[in-house]
Image (tube, rainbow, N blue to C red):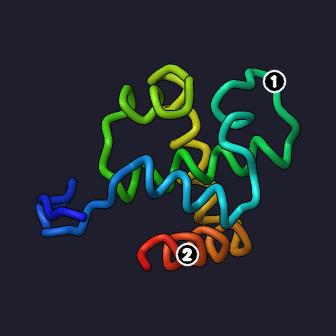
Amino acid sequence: MYHVLSRGNERKDIFHPEKVLEKAAGILNCGLDEIRRSRRISKSIKDDRYLLVYLVWKECMLPNEETGRLFGITYSAVSHILKSMRGRMQKEHDLRAKYKRIYSLCKM
């Protein structure tokens, strides 16, 4: 873990992206290979991938291009995922609770 200024210029703890990804995928009980390599995936896996992309981008403060490399997708796809997740996080209480649970377990 290391410290940087966040996008809002506040000090924030940053986590190693691969470690966060591995731990979060374990918590979600989903395979990283399937999430990283599959172009066409089922809705349940798609939701997990979107949540993982959002988590890694937000907590590791990676640019879209680097986040995309971790998942085998383009920076543009990351941008679309983030836009979708921002809206869904505001509307869907269950998704927000799932994110908070995964985030808190990844911090340990």
Residue drawn at (21%, 54%) of the image: 7
Q: Which residue is disc 1 drawn over?
A: 40
Q: Which of the two residues, 42 or 32, is positioned nearer the viewer here?
A: 32
Location of residue 42 with respect to 95 vertically, above or below: above
- For numbered disc 2, what is the local secondary structure? helix
Location of residue 73 with respect to 104 vertically, above or below: above
Badge 1 crowding class, 10 Å Cα cut-off, few under 14, some 14 to 19, many 20 or more, is few
Task: Compare marks 1 and 2 and give the one earlier in the sequence.
Answer: 1
Q: Is residue 7 left or right of residue 69?
A: left
| Residue type beneath disc 1 | Arg
User: Where is residue 89, by image quadrant?
Assistant: bottom right
Residue drawn at (73%, 73%) of the image: 94
Q: Which residue is disc 2 drawn over?
A: 100
User: Where is residue 10, by image quadrant?
Assistant: bottom left
Where in the figure is residue 80, as x and y percent of width and height? 56, 32
The reply to whether discs 1 and 2 touch (Cβ–Cβ < 8 Å) is: no
Residue drawn at (54%, 45%) of the image: 53
Where in the figure is residue 28, as x and y percent of width and height? 71, 62
Numbered circles on residues, count: 2
- For numbered disc 1, what is the local secondary structure? loop
